[in-house]
Image (cartoon, helix red, strand yellow):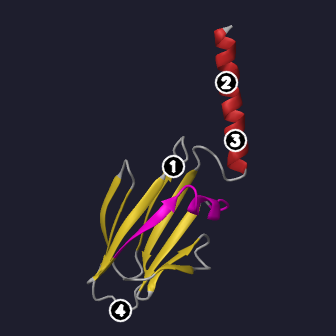
Amino acid sequence: MNFSIYILFIATFLILNKSAKATGLGIFQRYEVHITNNFENNTDELIVNCRSADDDLGEHFLDKGEDWHWQFRVNFFRSTLFYCNVQWGELGLRFTSFDTDNISSTCEETSTCFWSVREDGIYFSCDNKNYVKRHIWP
């Protein structure tokens, strides 16, 4: 009897998760985040350090036009959050690069988030074509 309930629970979980993935709400949905150095004046490298509560992805040094990206799965509680510190010369800014509640719903079709770091701010896109300014340098 207990084994049957266990099997039923697992089957229900898999069906609900598959259904949720079709609408972009999968519990373990995979996402990819890209950060690109799009400065016109590239006298300094863009220094990027991203992390979550569980993972520090390390420092990355991007020249003009270079892209750095990582992949991950949304956690069971759908509380996945990544933030990044970016520094270019004396300019520095910390921003949320992925938040399950906000950004994942914006990029649910592509499961990819693009960040373009520029002289006048940091821009966001889901398709790597249509960018919207989300942050300005302090």
Task: Say which residue appears at 59% left-offset and 59% top-offset.
Answer: 104
What type is the residue that disc 2 sits on? Phe
What type is the residue that disc 1 sits on? Ser
Find the distance from the CA under tag 4 to the CA under tag 1. 37 Å
**Residue 77 magenta-highlighted:** no
Task: Say which residue appears at 66% left-offset and 32% top-offset.
Answer: 13
**Residue 106 magenta-highlighted:** yes
Task: Say which residue appears at 37% left-offset and 47% top-offset.
Answer: 54
Per the image, the residue denoted by label 4 is 41
Image quadrant where residue 118 sits: bottom left
- Name the quarter where the C terminus is drawn: bottom left
Dot 2 or dot 3, earlier in sequence: 2
Find the distance from the CA under tag 2 to the CA under tag 4. 57 Å
Q: Which residues are magenta?
A: 93-110
In terms of secondary structure, where does tag 4 sit? loop
Dot 1 or dot 3, earlier in sequence: 3
Image quadrant where residue 2 sits: top right
